[in-house]
Amino acid sequence: MKAWPILLAILLGCALSFPQDAHAHMMPAQQGTVNILGKSAFVVVSVPVAALDARNDDDRDGSLSDSEIVTHQTALLAETGRRFRLLNGGECGVFVPVVVRAEADDHRHVTLLFKFDFSVEPIDVRVETDLFGATEDERQLTIRASRGKDGPRPENEAAVLRPSAPTHAFFRSKYHLFLDFIQLGFFHICSGFDHLLFLLTVLLGVARRPRPFRAILGVLTAFTVAHSVALVLALAGVGGLARVPPVVVESLIAATVIAAAAANYAGSGVAKDGGPRLPGADTRTLAVRGALVFVSGLVHGLGFAGALTEMQIVGTGRVASVVGFNAGIELGQLAVVLPGLALGLAVRRVLTAERQDQAVRVLATGTALLGCVWFVSRVAS
């Protein structure tokens, strides 16, 4: 009995059970702003109901109705005051509650409004919180802080908080901002399974060449240049690229995964001499594959731009943020791609050409199925 039908069934099961929001390009729904005016900081933050005390949810349905919010408003704000802190150096701001409201058409999140008062105008601003939900997409909170809006040098900075990094110091040097966004880009791409799957699939298509390293370097270069160009152009507002709806971009990203898998499937096979029929063995096929990688890189770059656009990065730290984020993406790619390539090249040494062909076909079929699941779910959303 051939093993490939069993492997294909396993891959199909993985595709259907894979997280449907496992992409590298959209930031989480949880958002917050900190606006510093004089000696006060005004805060608006949206958090998942799952992050709050379950006793506020009277009917235990995982959401808060308008009546439940009215009933428990004082308790909700008091809990927020205990779990969301804003500091100026060693001084913790005095929490002043304002109001709680349900987000429109989404009672699984609530928006909290409050402020912090300080004895002097905050300079060394730091936020600390543990208001994270239960699911993976609820375990990130994007905070945008601004100050000096009416002054000669307004400042605006964004940060992403997680359970592993629940605190952030705002308005430091551009060097520190650059390092922060390297880390953000690194973890952002490492959790982006659609992006990484596309890249690994493309690299698999060229790793079977007699001298694979030049082809691999070419693919990585083309993809890096393409997504970097698209990222910069979109953030610069060229051609309205930043206004492309996220559902369109994310659906196209899923389509690139399908296209990469289809290219590998079509390029597999065994030559007459018993060796593998090499993908991209002729100039025309190699050019088509290069064009696919470059165009796909542009699409993925729009996805990355969408993530940064959601954070509304403006002001003097914009360049440091964008460059750091892109550098983090590249480092994250290398952290995943290099071990994957090492494993693939090791497997190549022990498999015959026929077995390599079977493996490529099975992997391409499973990848295409997963891409189809992503594409349908994103279009439907």
Image (spheres, rainbow, N blue to C red):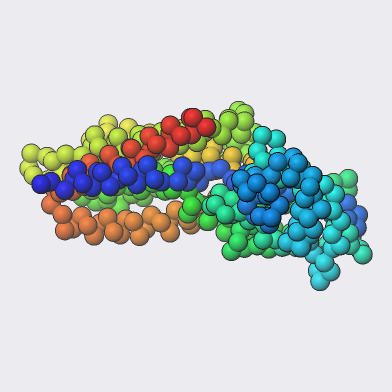
Expressed as whole percent of the image width and height from the top left, the position of residue 269 reads 16, 39
Q: Quadrant of residue 305?
A: top right
Q: Residue furthest front?
A: 59
Task: Establish if 64 lies above or below 337.
Answer: above
Answer with left or right where residue 370 lies relative to residue 122. Answer: left
Answer yes or no: is residue 352 visible.
yes
Q: Residue at x 69, y 55 (%)?
A: 55
Answer yes or no: is residue 360 visible.
no
Q: Residue furthest left?
A: 273
Q: Residue at x 88, y 45 (%)?
A: 150
Q: Residue at x 76, y 53 (%)?
A: 76
Q: Nearer the viewer, residue 332 or 23?
A: 23
Q: Quadrant of residue 335?
A: bottom left
Q: Nearer the viewer, residue 140 or 202?
A: 140
Expressed as whole percent of the image width and height from the top left, the position of residue 70 reads 79, 44
Task: Establish if 176 lies above or below 306.
Answer: below
Count of all numbered marks drawn on residues in the image:
0
Answer with left or right where residue 233 lies relative to residue 360. Answer: right
Task: Establish if 265 lies above or below 179.
Answer: above
Answer with left or right where residue 3 lies relative to residue 205. Answer: left
Task: Establish if 72 lies above or below 380.
Answer: below
Q: Residue furthest bottom?
A: 90
Expressed as whole percent of the image width and height from the top left, the position of residue 370 reads 36, 40
Q: Quadrant of residue 178?
A: bottom right
Q: Residue at x 48, y 34 (%)?
A: 378
